[in-house]
Image (cartoon, rainbow, N blue to C red):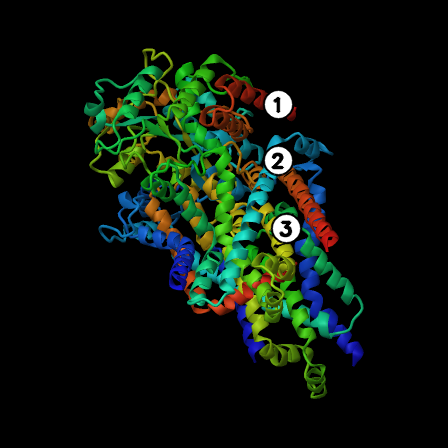
Amino acid sequence: MVIFKKTVFYTILFAAALTFLYPFIWMILATFKPEIEITEITLLPSVFTLRSYELVFNKIPIIRSFLNSLFVSVTATASVLFFSSMVGYSLSRLQFRGRELIFGVILLTMMIPAQITLIPMYILMVKLDLTNTYRALIFPASISAFGILLFRQYFKAFPQEIIDAARIDGAGEFTILYRIIWPNSIPTLITVGIITFMGIWNDVLWPLIVIRKENLMTMPQMVTLFSVGGRAEAQLGAILAAATLLAVPVMLIYLFFQKYFIRSMATSGLKN
Amino acid sequence: MRYKVLLSFFLIAIQLQFVSCSGNERERGEKYLTYWPAANQQEIDLAKKIVEKWNVIHPEFPVRMEPIPSGQSSEEVLLAAIAGKTTPDICSNIWPGVMEQYVEAGAVVNLDTMPGFDSLLTARIPETVVKGYSSSDGKYYQLPWKSNPVLFIYNRRYFDVLGIDSLPKSYSEFYEIAQRIKEMPIDDGLPLQWIHYRNILPIWWQRLFDFYPFYIAASGGKTLLKDGKVDFDNDTAVKVFEFFAEGYEKGYVSKSLLQMEDLFIKEKVLADIVGPWRVSHLAKFAPDLKYTYGPLPRPGGSEGPGLSYADPKSIVIFNNTPYPKMAWEFVKFLVSEENDRMLLDMTAQLPIRSGLLEKATFKEYFEANPGLKVFAEQVPYAIGVDRTIYLQEIFDIISQEFDAACVHRVKTPKEGISDAAKRVRLLLERDR
Amino acid sequence: MNRKLSLMGYLMSAPYIIYFIIFSAFPIFFSFFLIFHRWNIVGPMKWVGLANFNMMFSDPLFWTSIYNTIIFLLIHIPLQVVVALVLAEVLNQKIKARAFFRAAFFMPVVVSGVVVTILWKQLYSTDTGLLNNLLMAIGFGKVEWLTSTAMAMPSIALMATWKNVGLYMILFLAGLQSVPAYMYEAADIDGATTLQKFRYITIPAINPVIIMVLILSTIGGFSLFIEPYVMTGGGPLNSTLSTVLYIYRQGFSFYKMGYAATLGFMLAAIIFVVVLIQRKLIEQDD
């Protein structure tokens, strides 16, 4: 009886897991099928073909868009880590007038929904001649209020004696932050890093608005436009292949660094 | 050291951005033109060839070709380019329906001032329709380039199966065939399931390929507005709506969001509403498929040549160009007889020019492709679109009413048309 | 010394102040300015007073889009909470291959929304989709997942749940693991039923997580864009038209910047009020 119960339990659990994995498996395998077979229910292609990928590589600069995304996400993430920790440090370990005001402003901006700034931000980019530049993607993402709060929270608990000792040794505040506190804050750095990176990497709306030049487009943007625009010439296989190319790198990174991903994303829930 | 590494990486990254973006060769004195053709494969290939030829003749002033960046529609992308001042020098995929907006924004070059424009224009367009390409200030900002009359393409393989001996001319003949398709047993070994299919996404430009051409055909050449007032609040438009409503109601027409899948190539539909560009598309993806063209059915199936929407595209020069004179030279080169023939050969789209059926250069093409002849005959008289800055919004309104009255039938076709007319009137009045 | 430190404080928080002025304060003030104008960016700006607001209040599509979002939230949030809770409860047991199951449930969270949307658009396709093929194979009829007004928004909500449930599962799991084992043991001794244990031990422990899920999903729901943009274009019959998609269309298809800014302004106000009400209700509860 116990064995029977267990079998049923694991079967259901496995079916649940399959619900989350099967669509991806189907998608990846479908990209190797001939176009005519894609909508068939069978999983494996009758003949293995790379035609869908050929179409994608011939039609859109997908590699370039991958590099664009990588460049933008890495730069913005580096900037967020650098500046947000700086601000977080000043708000937690330095005394100055107006500190609480700045903290209040940060909390307030986090409560204002982003939708209100969408149109004015676009106009700002137009007026600064920043449309169709990487800067239009990086600058608005260069500091994160959430990152500041997280760093502030974490730095608060850092032992004051160590900081005092460093100051007596003549270390400046930047040295203290980046050479003494950073090496001791790796988990927080990873958390802010992953959340920021994933947020920028996956954003589509903003790139759609400010980037209209094909060789500057981000990868999710390019794949989106490939699927809704006419460029794919209604070749479902090519669209799925583009989606697969977008999904697989992140999936692989996730599988290797699962622990960090899950921990970091769980922290993102603390936002509010 | 760690933070210094990060800091220097960051600084390098910022440097890189400036280099990569403001590194405009033009500022370093290099001379060239930028040209955006439409982003479909055939036109990209055509543009490549034409640009190659130009660059051989004019090595001192080369053209750099880049297809219009992807977007939900070219119009959206071009307007963004105008706003961001990132337009190319020349673009050859301009829908005349947005010209008024470009003119109002001061984004395009007045071509009247260009040497030889008048003679080139009159050589391409008969005087009777040439006014349709002028702007409301009376000036010309666009050179009509090509046309893509919207028509039906039929899969010939099914003609015997379905007992079709002549192409359907009226709505009732058309749906008679549809009924036969529906009655066919499912496991007959044929993939055929519907008479045709349309993407039902309610995006404004989708109506350019169903409601609008059918309305032109049914009304004998009317467009949506006349003297700036609504001209589709009539029985003809209702009949067109009824036609589509019946198709969806009886399941004659596939209702999937089929943007991603080509049911005609998969032979699941008998017919498809397309422009002649489809010829080269089919040659690439389904070389063995046998097909034929036919005009759009009309309510009563009346005689005479069937009109349709011409889906014309024009060439413009954008005001941002530092070299308007040279750009004009390239435009003239683009529409030369030789290149117009190449347009036919490579894309099966029809150049807008008179004498298409008489001139030897083109004549032999139509002898080899008689199916396209009927559309070539129409080209000089092809129906385009109205001249208003609200055209996209008008099509957006019609699109929503089409969705309501035809696809989902929550109101009658009559209500759909009269609601659309009401809303368009409101739109036109608002700004007065 | 202190003076120097306080100077450093200003210096080190300067990046945020600059960022705030350019990317928060300016856009917000500029949007106050825009909502009284009609402007297509390329032409001249025209003062229209409250015309944009009049237009908005009589614009059925804007209110449809708000209504659609509420429908989305009403389906998505309960479904999300229940499924996430069940999965978390299961993963909190002593089971084999727990890491595998956790990784599987979390997979859609990390994959880009675009991929998920493209994939599900195909799965949902009425005539050729995998889901309907499956239903037909086991003898059911076709479901018009995305092509009927009644089903389209629920289908999108179902997909969004599939995508996000892993994240909320992890949050719930953290909540569940914070409950000390002795509490359940004590309840066992008192003879509590499973349901009672759930009601009086588990629910209070994860209550903060439920609040979080509620607020996060609400904000997320009001930002719905890519799903209808790729899958339905807002159709059928505007039943999946989300407010952000509508703003995008007004702003970037028709270039009505003043009107789009007005809609953005209104949407932000609505979100603000809804979240505020949610908080108030929850605080009253406690």
Judged left or right of residue A88, residue C158 is left
Q: Position of residue B241 (x, y in %)?
A: 45, 20
Tell me if residue A50 can be seen.
yes
Residue at the location (25% across, 25% down)?
B371
Along the line of sight, the residue nearer the viewer: B157 or B138: B157
Q: CA distance from mark 3 to mark 1?
A: 32 Å
Read off the chain for label 3.
Answer: A
Vertical order, A80 against B303 (above or below): below
Q: Considering the numbered disc 1 on the image, is that residue within a helix, a strand or a loop? A: helix
* Mark 3 surroundings: few (<14), some (14-19) or many (≥20) residues within 10 A: some
Along the line of sight, the residue nearer the viewer: C18 or B136: C18
Q: Amino acid at mark 3?
A: Ala
Residue bearing mark 3: A114
* Mark 1 surroundings: few (<14), some (14-19) or many (≥20) residues within 10 A: few
Judge depth for marks 3 and 1 and give the one in front.
Answer: 3
Q: Position of residue B349 (x, y in %)?
A: 32, 32
Q: Considering the numbered disc 2 on the image, is that residue within a helix, a strand or a loop? A: helix
Q: On the image, which quarter does residue A178 sit in?
A: bottom right
Q: Amino acid at mark 2?
A: Phe
Q: Amino acid at mark 1?
A: Leu
Judged left or right of residue A254, residue B350 is left
Q: Position of residue A139 (x, y in %)?
A: 59, 59
* Mark 2 surroundings: few (<14), some (14-19) or many (≥20) residues within 10 A: many
Q: On the image, which quarter does residue B293 sit in?
A: top left
Residue bearing mark 2: C62
Q: Considering the numbered disc 3 on the image, is that residue within a helix, a strand or a loop? A: helix
